[in-house]
Amino acid sequence: MSNSWFIIANSTSGNRNFSKQWKEIEQLLKNKNINYSFAFTQFSKHEVELVDTAIQQGFRNIISVGGDGTLHHVVNGIMLQRYVKTSDITIAVIPIGTGNDWIKTYNIPEKLENVIEIITKKKIITQDIGVLETENKTITYFNNVAGLGYDGYIVNKLESLKRFGAIAYLLSGLAGLLLYKKSIFKIIIDDKIIETNCLMTLFGICNFSGGGMQFTKDVNPSDGLLDITIAKNLNIFDLIFNIRKLYSGSIVHHKKIETYKTKTITVLPIDTKPFIQADGELIGSGKVTVKIIEKAINFVVN
Ligand SMILES: Nc1ncnc2c1ncn2[C@@H]1O[C@H](COP(=O)(O)OP(=O)(O)OP(=O)(O)O)[C@@H](O)[C@H]1O
């Protein structure tokens, strides 16, 4: 069992024909003599239960077949189980989602043949995992990028637009700015208190979010630090004139953006309850405290 993989597959991820992709995945795994069992998710967050059962049965290697949301829930399943240390578990990702942002940090390709090849090599990085605690004491883990404010607003709006792919993030991201009302955030980082009109505050472990955009600076996913980005009173013109910089990452040098590295941060929105997103999943609204767990889970990378 310790060398075998347990595959958790989300047939609703992405816009392509899942059964065709699944057939190809099974064929490639068989060609490479990779030992595996599998289960399909039946509903959102089912990943958490499936991971728990797989680990209880003795599996230590898990493959997430889906997008960033599926991976997010697999990670939460690992962090929530109580059978083994989380660092005893290894996750590989077969990306069939829409954004597939987490894989971009590690140059993991989307072509199935190449991904399976990477899984056979099993090169591993032990990555940090973030923890968010909301006002009602709900705990959520994340492996890529979380945030509150405008990014949460977009995640909430995007449900119906997702089938249009990564371009939908960009278009709804720009159009939404005309309607979105920024608000004052009180941000506590170590001994520093920042009170500012804020479009959004992001908590990063890896580089990419929003379908290939980069808002985090000098990322190291295993250094035990959150990469904080505070986007202050940016407006639609700031973004339209800097579209290329959103994707290249140099937007972080904009004068209305500040970045920090820290182990813990609290954000208190004043008078509003902005949406909070984690890895592109909507998880709550309002006040949030974020911490980081250094080197928590192993991931197969390129
Ligand atoms: N059987 C299911 N039915 C409905 N929703 C599901 C099911 N299984 C998983 N989900 C949920 O579907 C959501 C979206 O999945 P996922 O993020 O993997 O795909 P995506 O949105 O196409 O990709 P990305 O996040 O990379 O853009 C996740 O919240 C996941 O928990």
Image: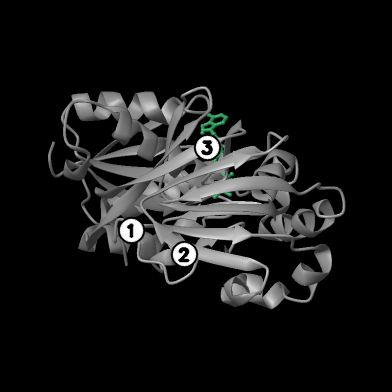
Q: Which residue is mark 2?
A: 104
Mark 3: which secondary structure?
Answer: strand
Residue depth check, mark 3 versus mark 2: number of the one nearer the observer: 3
Q: What amino acid is found at the position of numbered circle 1 in the picture? A: Ile
Q: Which residue is mark 1?
A: 116
| Residue 285 placement (x, y as % from top left) | 62, 33
Q: Is residue 81 visible?
A: yes
**Camera-side residue: 282 or 70?**
282
Indicate which quadrant contains ligand 1. top right
Number of other residues with Cα within 10 Å of mark 1, as a class: few under 14, some 14 to 19, many 20 or more: many
In primary-sequence order, the first of circles 1 and 2 is 2
Q: Is residue 36 left or right of residue 182?
A: left
Instruction: Give how far apart the Cα atoms at labels 3 and 2 are.
Output: 27 Å
Q: Which residue is mark 3?
A: 288
In primary-sequence order, the first of circles 1 and 3 is 1
Q: For disc 2, does the CB lie below 8 Å from ligand 1?
A: no
| Residue 199 placement (x, y as % from top left) | 70, 54
Mark on residue 9?
A: none
The vertical placement of 56 against 196, above or below, is: above
**Camera-side residue: 270 or 95?**
270
Residue in the image at 29% along x and 26% along y: 52
Instruction: Give how far apart the Cα atoms at labels 1 and 3 are.
Output: 38 Å
